[in-house]
Amino acid sequence: MKRTRVVVAAVPLVVFAAVSFLAYGLSVSFRLPTPFNENCVNWLKSCEENCVQNSTTPIPKHVHFVSLNHPFSFMEWLAVVSARNKIKPDKITVYTDGLQDSCWWRRALPYIDHQIIHTLPGANVLNRVPIKLLPHKSDFLRLSILYHSGGIYMDTDILSLNSFDPLLKHQMVLAEQCHYALNVALMMAQKHSCLVCRFAHYSCERFNGGWVHHSVDALSSFIRGLDKEKEGVLVVPWKKGFFPMCWNANGINQLYKKHFNDIPDYNRSEIYSVHLYNNKAKNLIPKTLHNFDWIQTSTSLVGLTIRESLPPGFSKHHLNESSRCTDIQLPD
């Protein structure tokens, strides 16, 4: 895998990250925070002056993950590994706060091409409403990533099942969630896309502190108002998309418990990814993702997908955080 040189745009407090990544030949850069209200003011100007409309350039095969304010977990490691093996991207970039030093983080390094150490701005105000929640800050960060770099943004609780290559010819790719809404947990777009720029501005205007008013609700409303064919937008049906199950109790049960072949209208070859809904399923995770016997025997969609994602030689002791971090046999 080709590695790029180290680029330092600003000197942070964290020296560990640079040393760790140099050991793997990875590229590391640093990004200073920009207040969200300033970013939102700039979106409209960017749309008018810099965005690219109706480009025929494919969506870059560049996967982006954001992991902030917590130790890198087994679930996040699985997300990175499955993306590398199934999407086979040209590059994987992980945005972190520079403090990652967990066992799973070090195990993920061979799969990652570039780290951007990004400090999110503190609580500031948009539309006279404080932006305090990390998920809300992440909502705006992912749009900035997609606009400036293009590619595939994925939440770190999403596992990849199949190649995304058939989707790359579009200008923007989204997927339904539970019939009626579009989810922002996985989004694909061309670099400097006018669609992303316009939606980012639309999202900023609608921020009111509500949980999804500026994100899921705003995206669904924004896309409904478009001529999708003319704009080059693909919306993948939810049972064949990125989020094949709902986040409600029945959907979580289907994801983690039910024998997948007993669920009608699903074909694993048509599903691009699986959203694990880690917040909704947090009570199940100790019994499932952290249970090697369950991983080995489960016939649920999550169980089957995890087994496909694990590298050769992965065994029960690898789930133990105290085990050595260099003892997993990694795939080529």
Image: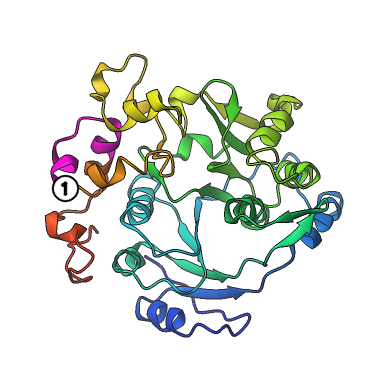
Task: Name the kind of residue labelled 1 in the image.
Answer: Phe
Q: Is residue 330 left or right of residue 248?
A: left
Q: At which x and y percent is residue 78?
A: 32, 51
Which residue sits at x=67%, y=70%? 33
Q: Is residue 75 left or right of residue 64?
A: left
Q: Is residue 302 magenta?
A: yes
Q: Is residue 258 visible?
A: yes
Q: At which x and y percent is residue 197?
A: 75, 47
Nearest to the observer: residue 306 or residue 207? 207
User: What is the span of residues highlighted in magenta in the rendered image?
Assistant: 293-305
Nearest to the observer: residue 243 or residue 321? 321
Nearest to the observer: residue 120 or residue 29? 120
Q: Is residue 87 magenta?
A: no
Q: Is residue 313 visible?
A: no
- Look at the magenta stretch and give its main secondary structure: helix
Q: At which x and y percent is residue 317?
A: 13, 60
- Above or below residue 259? Residue 47 is below
- Above or below residue 295? Residue 134 is below
Q: Is residue 180 left or right of residue 257?
A: right
Q: Return the residue found at the far top.
A: 264
Residue 303, quarter of the rendered image:
top left
Q: Which residue is mark 1?
A: 292
Which residue sits at x=41%, y=77%? 21
- Above or below residue 96? Residue 62 is above
Q: Secondary structure at mark 1?
A: helix
Nearest to the observer: residue 25 or residue 98? 98
Which residue sits at x=17%, y=40%? 294
